Amino acid sequence: MKRFIFSNINSLLINAFLLFFLLFATQNSQEKKVLKFFNKETIELPISFILGTSLIVGSLSGNFILSILNFQHKDRKDT
């Protein structure tokens, strides 16, 4: 259980650092696009911010799914 928590905290810290760096890096971005999501439109966002946040969300969700599967696999192995 400690390994499960440490792995996820480590991932959260790394991705928070990446998001912090992403916010500073996209301040001067000039090229902006509007996202359409469920027939709703967002404000104009820089393309680099859209790509960066999708990378961070994918990294977090992939790590959580992998750690849950590993945790369940180890529980089955122990019984």
Image (tube, rainbow, N blue to C red):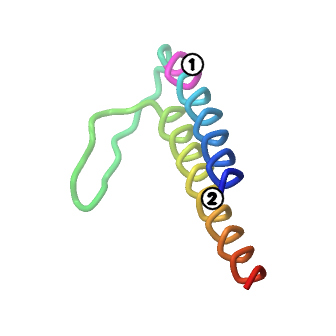
Identified by mark 2, the residue type is Gly
Residue 67 found in image quarter: bottom right
**What residue do we see at 32% from left, 33% from top?**
44
In the displayed structure, does residue 66 sit left or right of residue 50? Answer: right
Q: Which contiguous range is marked in magenta?
A: 21-26
In the displayed structure, does residue 10 sit left or right of residue 39? Answer: right
Q: Main secondary structure of the magenta part?
A: helix
Q: How many marks on residues? A: 2
**Which mark is on residue 62?**
2
Q: To which residue does mark 1 refer?
A: 25
**What residue do we see at 61% from left, 41% from top?**
9
Q: Is residue 45 above or below residue 11?
A: above
In front of the other: 70 or 26 = 70
Determine the CA span between mark 2 and mark 1.
24 Å
Q: Residue furthest left?
A: 40
**What residue do we see at 61% from left, 66% from top?**
68
Circle 1 crowding by C-alpha within 10 Å: few under 14, some 14–19, many from 20: few
Quadrant position of the C terminus in the picture: bottom right
Q: Residue furthest right?
A: 77
**How far across and how far down the image is residue 78, in percent?**
76, 79
Whether the magenta-drawn stretch holds residue 72 is answered as: no
**Which mark is on residue 36?**
none
Circle 2 crowding by C-alpha within 10 Å: few under 14, some 14–19, many from 20: few
**How far across and how far down the image is residue 5, in percent?**
62, 49
